[in-house]
Image (cartoon, rainbow, N blue to C red):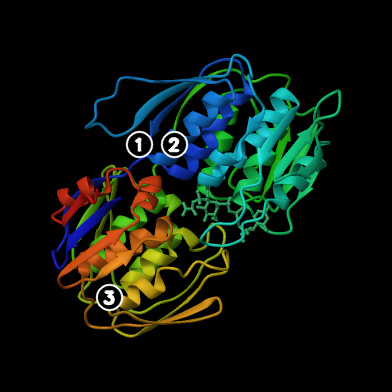
Amino acid sequence: MDKIIIKGGRRLEGRIQISGAKNAALTLLPCALLTDEPLTLRNLPRLADVDGFGHLMNQLGASTMIEGSKRDEFGRVMTLRASNIASTVAPYDIVRKMRASILVLGPLMARAGEATVSLPGGCAIGNRPIDLHLKALEALGAEIELAAGYVKAKVPSGGLRGGHVRFPVVSVGATENALMAAVLAKGTTVIENAAREPEITDLAMCLIAMGAKISGLRTDTLTVEGVDRLHGATYAVMPDRIEAGSYACAAAITGGSIELVGARKETMTAILDALIEAGVTVEDVKGGIRVTAGADIKPLTLSTAPFPAFPTDMQAQFMSMLALANGTSLLTETIFENRYMHVPELSRMGADIDVRGRAAVVRGVPKLHGAEVMATDLRASMSLILAGLAAEGETIVSRIYHLDRGYERLEEKLQAVGADIERVSAG
Ligand SMILES: CC(=O)N[C@H]1[C@@H](OP(=O)(O)OP(=O)(O)OC[C@H]2O[C@@H](n3ccc(=O)[nH]c3=O)[C@H](O)[C@@H]2O)O[C@H](CO)[C@@H](O)[C@@H]1O
Ligand SMILES: C=C(OP(=O)(O)O)C(=O)O
């Protein structure tokens, strides 16, 4: 298994191109199931999850064609075409590796009238149930049963019909499934307490480009007028706000200055506000944002919550940065019950962190030191990379397949701004 070796202590300076957003790509890909015409997605990141989703789309009968982009170019172009739906089954083997596979449920039901999708189960960060996805689809008329670890969903003759969905808890995935199902339902659907993450807006804009009628974008109430059919479209995936935020932390933690090329400020307000409060300078530059570390890192009190608040997907990276702050920070994780798996690993590098339930007290230390550490999930892995970049000596991060799910060409991007980082094959 591959490992990443970092020799820490270098100040990072330069430009990093921000890739297309993983979490937008994973909800835009299944949109291709909603039409028999081609859907072309531009700016798709080269990630294991995107490849995995493409494979799932192939199993369901969609063709996927990647335009001949050069290895050194960012942003692949993929044209997907589901002329027919060959299968309505998303098997355990695929869903288990990539939870976002659950996002084929809504589109399959809308287009094919049925779907059998493996229950994703929990993962390292928490239980991650899908009850809200199922309730939303039931509100549109779906009949759902759970059997042998699978969701078996059927649409009554006459198809899905518009309905009223009110989520008791904000869920990104359930909002996405509800939206993708509602666009082809008969009549009007109102989705209340919808997630407002920028990736939801990206999904809605792609569906609109395909002929869907959706209003209320960027608000917590989405109204969908069902249409009889959708058509093909070309759509560019939004830049990855979590990747951009992660590299902003890399600048802050190494005392450096990085231009995040292509980053969209309006999708990252809470992240940038927190960085500014920590003493980082954030400037608008043409086509992106420049972040420059302050003289020291100031401690923060931060709580994760749905957009527009501070994202859970940035909690681990901020924790590494705050481990070196000039004082004590308090982080509260309100979204996932088990998202502190990086804490014992950071502690092995000299961080002083106490977890009490959903809260973590991070007492800043003057230095971290290199160690052998193990990645446990995607953002936890990035927090270890960040700690390694700042630490004295050598850090070896193993189980880095998690990183390949969400960070395109991580070593290359960090090397370009002066990091001493390499991937080694451990046989
Ligand atoms: C591929 C993708 O876009 N993943 C993102 C998505 O995950 P995902 O869509 O899985 O996360 P959700 O927004 O659904 O989860 C939010 C909360 O709702 C709960 N919940 C969710 C669904 C459900 O049916 N029942 C239920 O109780 C979850 O356990 C969690 O506590 O949003 C998360 C929250 O911003 C991010 O961390 C993930 O990176
Ligand atoms: C938790 C994440 O992703 P996923 O929902 O795909 O597991 C993430 O992107 O941090």
The answer to whether one can see residue 292 in this image is: no
State the residue in front, 100 or 426. Answer: 426
**Pointer 3 or 2: first along the chain:** 2
Kindly give the residue lying farthest to the right in the view shown.
157
Left or right of 16 on screen, residue 340: right
Quadrant of the image where one finds ligand 1: bottom right
| Residue indicated by mark 3 | 349
In the picture shown, does residue 138 fall above or below 393? Answer: above
| Residue indicated by mark 2 | 50
Q: Are marks 3 and 2 in contact (CB under 8 Å)?
A: no
Q: Are marks 3 and 1 in contact (CB under 8 Å)?
A: no
In the picture shown, does residue 146 fall above or below 86? Answer: below
Dot 1: element: loop
Dot 2: element: helix
**Pointer 3 or 1: first along the chain:** 1
What label sits on residue 344 in the rendered view? none
Picture coordinates of residue 153, whole percent (x, y): 77, 36
In the picture shown, does residue 119 fall above or below 255? Answer: above
State the residue in front, 227 or 112. Answer: 112
Picture coordinates of residue 287, whole percent (x, y): 29, 42
Picture quadrant of residue 245: bottom left
Q: Are marks 2 and 1 in contact (CB under 8 Å)?
A: yes
| Residue indicated by mark 1 | 46
